[in-house]
Amino acid sequence: MAIVALMALISACGGGDPEELTFDLEIKDRQLNIGVIEAKQDDTVTLNISSDEPGEFHLHGYDYEEDISPDAVTALVFEANATGKFNITFHPGSGHTEDEEPVVADESHDHDDAEEEEDVLIGSLEVQPR
């Protein structure tokens, strides 16, 4: 009987096979609809990201940065091979749509603009060992 209990414990705690996980993320009023995204090591993670304003979605630790705009859903697909907790930030106004030309900084422009440099912590990705 002890062997059966041990086998059940191992299967419950064991990592199992990697999974394909999809999360629909919505940034609204600079807040994410999901505070913590959870995955296990080696899972394939798809983040479908939409926003109510243009900007840049940044997954720290993995160093993925994606421009996002209000008129599109941006997909970020990656293998969650690093374990730990990784911050997700939103950089308002730094993204652009395909129809827009990237904004070129004017040397006379004051770069102390808080809106331009703001990093908003909107959530995190937690990847557990398998």
Image: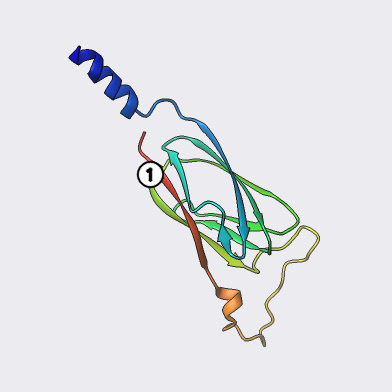
Q: Residue furthest left?
A: 2
Q: Is residue 64 left or right of residue 15?
A: right
In this orientation, which residue lies closer to the viewer: 31 or 129?
31
x 38%, y 44%: residue? 83
In this rendering, the count of numbered labels is: 1
- Residue 22: x and y, percent? 57, 39
x 44%, y 25%: residue? 17
Q: Residue furthest top?
A: 1
Q: Is residue 21 above or below residue 58?
A: above
x 67%, y 88%: residue? 108
- Residue 114: x and y, percent? 57, 80
Task: Place residue 90 in its image quadrant.
Answer: bottom right
- Residue 76: x and y, percent? 60, 46
* Secondary structure state at the residue bearing disc 1: loop
Q: Is residue 68 above or below residue 1?
A: below
Q: Is residue 75 above or below residue 2?
A: below
Q: Residue furthest front?
A: 1
Which image quarter is the C terminus in? Answer: top left
Amino acid type, label 1 = Thr
In this orientation, which residue lies closer to the viewer: 60 or 28?
28
- Residue 126: x and y, percent? 42, 47
Alpha-carbon neighbours of circle 1 within 10 Å: few (<14), some, or many (≥20)?
Answer: some
Q: How is the image coloured?
A: rainbow
x 72%, y 71%: residue? 103
Q: Is residue 70 above or below residue 119?
A: above
Which image quarter is the N terminus in? Answer: top left
Q: Which residue is mark 1?
A: 83
